Every structure is written in C-alpha cells, then in structure tokens.
Image: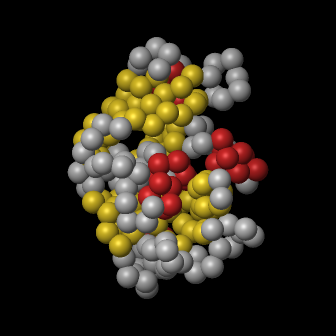
Amino acid sequence: MRRTHRAALLSVAALAAAVLPATAAHADPGTAQATAFTCYPGTAKAFDYTSTAVVDEQATTTLPDGTRLPAGYVAQSDPPYHPTKTSGRLVDAFTNLSTQRVIRRNDSATSWFTYDPAPTVPGALATGTYISAGSNAESFGPKSLAALKAAGTPEPTLVFVRGLLVMRFVIDAEGPYVTSFALKGTEQNGCALLSGRS
C-alpha cells in the first residue's frame, strides 16, 4: 500500500509499492498526484477525499533477504516481489472534496515491506507484512475495510498513526488489501478530522 496511500493497500497506495516492488505509491516522486478514497462509505455522512503528496523526497531501496526489520521481522522475497525500505521526507495534503477542508501532515515514517516466501492465502499472488515507524497516514479501500472488520480490528478509511505499525497484506488478482492492523502508539480518525466533527 508507498504511503498514505499505503493501502492501501494496506492502504491502496502503500500496496502500490507492494504490487510494483521497489517503487513508491506515488508514480512520480515529487509530483502532486491525488488518490481518491471514501470516508464513511455507504452512510449518509459519506464523503470523498484525496491525498496528495505536497513534498515527496522519499527513496525506496531493495533489501537483501535476511535483513533484520523492526518488530522482529526479517526481510524475505517471493519473486518478483522483494523486500524494500522507504524513507525520507513526505508531506501529504488531505482534502475533503465536499467541504474543501484540507489537513496537511508530515508523514515521513520509515516503512518496510517483506514477503512470505510462498503466499499464505490460497489463490493469492503474494502475502506479506508492512511495517512503519514514526508518523504516517493509512488509507484503506473497501476490501481492506471489510477484512479488518472481519479480523476484529475495524479502522476508519483514513487513520493517522504515530508509533510502530504492523499490517499483514494480501495481493490477489483484484489487487492488494490489508488483513490485520497492530499499532504500538497512537492513532487519530482522519475521517473525523477531515469532516470537522472531532
């Protein structure tokens, strides 16, 4: 899911990095590309928002298998997917498309992707773990939201986190999605903040 985005993918964008190994979710680092998501989907208070990288000075590098990662994980490959580390300055702007309310955030957490040597979910193209340390934002698509709810860890479409975040993800024929969310730190409901209700 790189980031905020990482989502997706996880958040959808973060998983863009997973689907396209060694590339960031932003197709062109340093450009302002917006990705749209829906807060409170299927409810009367639903609204769309975009996340745009205002500053993207991040770099992604491929890691050798066996590299130690935070939270006790070890970098592993499942070719053509290879473990990566992304770090550098990232400033995102989140815009509520109904009210034009904008939140800017420093989302410069360092993040890592590692893959299971063989998918652990039947029919999956790949499965793995996403880790971030620091301040970050995660945007979740419908499939991730459903999987997180089923796992007993429901999250809003947009969540701002600070600390050590570990998420499991699956990449299947429909794309990437997150299946678990474990945070040692703090989180804020980004949808509530964007709606002005918090």
Residue 119 on image: x %, y %: 65, 74
Q: With respect to residue 143, does 122 lie above or below?
A: below
Residue 107: x %, y % from top left: 35, 45
Give residue 40's position: percent from left, percent from top.
63, 28
Answer left or right for 56 relative to 132.
left
Question: Is residue 192 visible to the viewer in this orientation of the structure?
Answer: no
Please, is residue 193 above or below residue 168 in the view? above
The residue shown at (36%, 76%) is 63
Residue 175 visible in rendering = yes
Residue drawn at x 36%, y 49% as measured from the top left: 27
Q: Where is residue 195 in the image (x, y as percent from the top left)?
A: 51, 21
Q: Which of 184 and 60 is in front in this view?
A: 60
Between residues 85 and 81, which one lies in front from this camera angle?
A: 81
| Residue 132 lies in quadrant | bottom left
Residue situated in front as seen by the camera: 148 or 124? 124
Count of numbered circles on the image:
0
